[in-house]
Amino acid sequence: MAESRQLNAPLMYGLVLSVLMVSAPHADHMPLWVSALCGMLLAWRAYLVRAGLRSINRWAPPAITVAGIVGLLIQFHTLFGQEAGVTLLVMLTSLKLLELRTPRDATVVIYLSSFVIITNFFYSQTIPTALFMLATLLVIVTTWLHLQSAALRLKPRLRIAALLLAQSVPLMLVLFVLFPRVQGPLWSMPREDLSKTGLTDTMSPGSISKLSLSDEIAFRVTFKGAPPLRSQMYWRGPVLSNYDGRNWTPSKGPTGRKPQLDNLSGQTDYTVLLEPHYKTWLFALEMPTRVSIPAFFTYDFQLRQKDPVSSRLQYDAQSELSYRANAEEDPFQLRYALLLPPGTNPRARQLAQEWRATYRSDDIIVQAALRHFNQQGFAYTLEPPPLGADAIDDFLFVTRKGFCEHYASTFVFLMRAAGIPARVVTGYQGGEFNDLGGYFIVRQSDAHAWAEVWLQGQGWVRVDPTAAVSPARVQSGLAAAMPNSTALPLMARTSSAWLLRLRFNLDLIAFQWDKWVLGYDTERQFSLLAKLGMGDITWRKLGLYMLGLLGILTGLFALLMLRGLHARRAEETLRLYRKFCRKLEKAGVARAAHEGPQDFAARAARAMPRQAPSIADITALYVGLRYGGAAGRDGLPALRRAVGAFKI
C-alpha cells in the first residue's frame, strides 16, 4: 500500500509526458497505425489518472501486445532490424504505461524512455534533434526525482535535474574525446530506408529535374586556396554508358585498361564533407588525382570506395582542372560508347548522319549539335512535357523543352549516331558560397547531367549541352536560370539579404556540428590528440587516460557534493539555533552580540529555571553540530525536533 501511494497523479503525468516526448519524433517513420495505437495508449493512461483509476483489466495489455506484434510481423515480416525493432520498442514502452502499479513499474518506464532516446539518433543527428532530446532527458530526470521524493516541488526538481545534467557534461566530453572511435557509422544497424534523396546510377527523362526540387545538402566543400570559377565546378559522379531507349545505366561490359590522365594543370586542393547517400561513389572535381581515404578510380574516372557511404564522410582531395583523359582508349570501350538501341529515334539518327556527311571533323560535329540547341528555340525548364516512345525525336523536333538530363541524353544519342563515342556523366554543378564560413554548399538542387565525347588526340572531353541553351545555369546556378520559377526549393530561390544571412549563419552552425561532432572519426581523434602532445598514443594508453580522467572527475564531484552537503548542514544548524534564540528573546532573554552559545545558555537557564534542561540540551546539540562535537548522525533531526518542541 505504501508503494501504491507513491504513484500519484503528477508522477503519472510525468511518465506519460516522458514517453510522449521520446516517441513523438518516431511518428514520422513508423507505420500510421502504430503511431495511432501509441497515441491512444498515452491518452488512455492520462484518462485513467484523471479519473482516479490505478489500473485496467489485467488481460488488456497482453492482448494489445500480442495484436501489436502480429501487426508488426504483417507490416515488416520480421521483428528485427532498425525499422521493426525501433517500432516494437516504442510500442512496448507505451504499453508499459497501462500496467503501472508500483514504483518498480515506474522505474522500468523511466529506463525504457532513456533507452528510446538513443533510437532517435538513428534517423537524425542534427542540432535540433540533440536539443529536443536534451529537453526530453530533463523531463525524464525530473520525473525520476519525483519518484524518489514526492515532497519536492516542481521547480526544485527541475533545478536539481538541470544540475545533474550539467555535472555530466565534463564526463561526456572526456568520453567523447578519448573513447576509441569505430570505423563506419556509429549506429551500424541494417537499414531498410535507403531510398534517400540523391543521385542514382540510372537516368531517365525527369529524374534529375525532380531531384532539383530538393534543397537537401549533398556535401560541403572547403577549398585550401582560391576556389575555381563556378563554371569549372563539375562534381563528377556516376558515369552512364548503356542506353535502352529510355534509361541510361552504367556500362555492363569489361572495364578495359586502367584510367590514364596526362597533360595535367590547374591543381586545386579542397576538403569534402559528404552526407550519407548509401552508394559507393564519392564526389570530386573533374578530374581528381588524389584522395585522403581508401578509394579507387574506375576505368571511366568514377571515384568510388568499397563500401556504401552510410555515414557522414570527410576527405581531402586534389583535382586538376585541365587534363587529357584516356587519349589512348581501349577499342572495346570506344565501340561500346557508340551503341544505340536499334530502330529508335529515326529523325535524330538522320540529323546526325547529315552532320556527318556535311562535316568531316568530330570537333565541328560537336559544335554543330551545340549550335542546334542554341539556335533552334530550345528552352530550359523544370517542368518539361511528357515524351513518347521515341523520346529523343519528341524532344528534338516537338517539345524542345527540357532539363539537363534531356539535353545530355539527346546530345550523347546524336554523337553516337554520328559515329562519335560519347557517354553521360551525372553529378553536381556549382555550389553556393557561404562567406561566413568560407565554404561551398552543394545541394541536391545542384544535381546536373552533362556529356563526354572521345576525340582523337584529346581523349574524353567534357561537353555540357545545357550551357548552350542556358549559360546562366552553369555560370550562376539554377535560380539564375529560372528566376521566376516557384517550383524551385526555397533555398535555391531566396533573394532576401537578411534571409540569406540567417540561412548562412544557421548552416555555419550545422557545418561545425557536422565537422567536429558528427565527423569526429578516428583520423580526427588522433589528429587532436597529437596536437595535445599525445602523438604516440595507443588504444591501451587511450583507455588508461580515459579511465584516469573519469576517476579524477568523479572524485572531484564527490568532494564538491560532500562539501555542499556539509555547507547545507551548517546552514540549517544555524537557522534552527537562531529560531531558538528568537523564542528566548520573546520571553525577554535576548542574546548579546558578544555572547557565546554556552554563556548565553547559562544566563537563559538562570532566568528561566523551568526550561533549563531544554535550553542545555538544545545548546549542546547546536555546539556539537556547529563546532564538530559528538552530535552524531541524528543530531540535526534531533535539534529540529527540540527547537520545535521548545515552549516558553
Image (cartoon, rainbow, N blue to C red):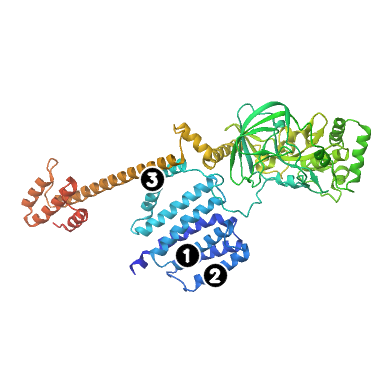
> Which of pointers 3 and 2 lies earlier in the amino acid sequence?
2
Left or right of 558? Residue 408 is right
**Mark 1 = which residue?**
96
Left or right of 473? Residue 47 is left
Q: Quadrant of the N terminus?
A: bottom left
The nearer-to-camera label among 1 and 2 is: 2
**Mark 3 = which residue?**
167
> Which of pointers 1 and 2 lies earlier in the amino acid sequence?
2
Is label 2 in a helix, a strand or a loop?
Answer: helix
**Residue 554: quadrant of the picture:** top left
Q: CA distance from mark 3 to mark 2?
A: 42 Å
Left or right of 494? Residue 557 is left
Instruction: Give the label on residue 66, or none.
Output: 2
> Which of pointers 1 and 3 lies earlier in the amino acid sequence?
1
Q: How many numbered discs sit on the rendered protein? A: 3
State the residue at coordinates (81%, 28%): 457
**C-beta proximity under 8 Å, tags 3 and 2:** no
Instruction: Please say if 393 is above or below 234.
Output: below
On the image, the x and y values in percent for residue 70 come to 58, 68
On the image, the x and y values in percent for residue 134 come to 47, 49
The front one of 646 and 361 is 361
Q: CA distance from mark 1 to mark 3?
A: 30 Å
On the image, the x and y values in percent for residue 246 come to 81, 49
The front one of 543 and 420 is 543
The front one of 593 and 558 is 558
Instruction: Please say if 345 is above or below 496.
Output: below
Is label 1 in a helix, a strand or a loop?
Answer: helix
The front one of 153 and 81 is 81
* Mark 1 surroundings within 10 Å by alpha-carbon count, few (fewer than 14), some (14 through 19), many (20 or more): some
* Mark 2 surroundings within 10 Å by alpha-carbon count, few (fewer than 14), some (14 through 19), many (20 or more): few
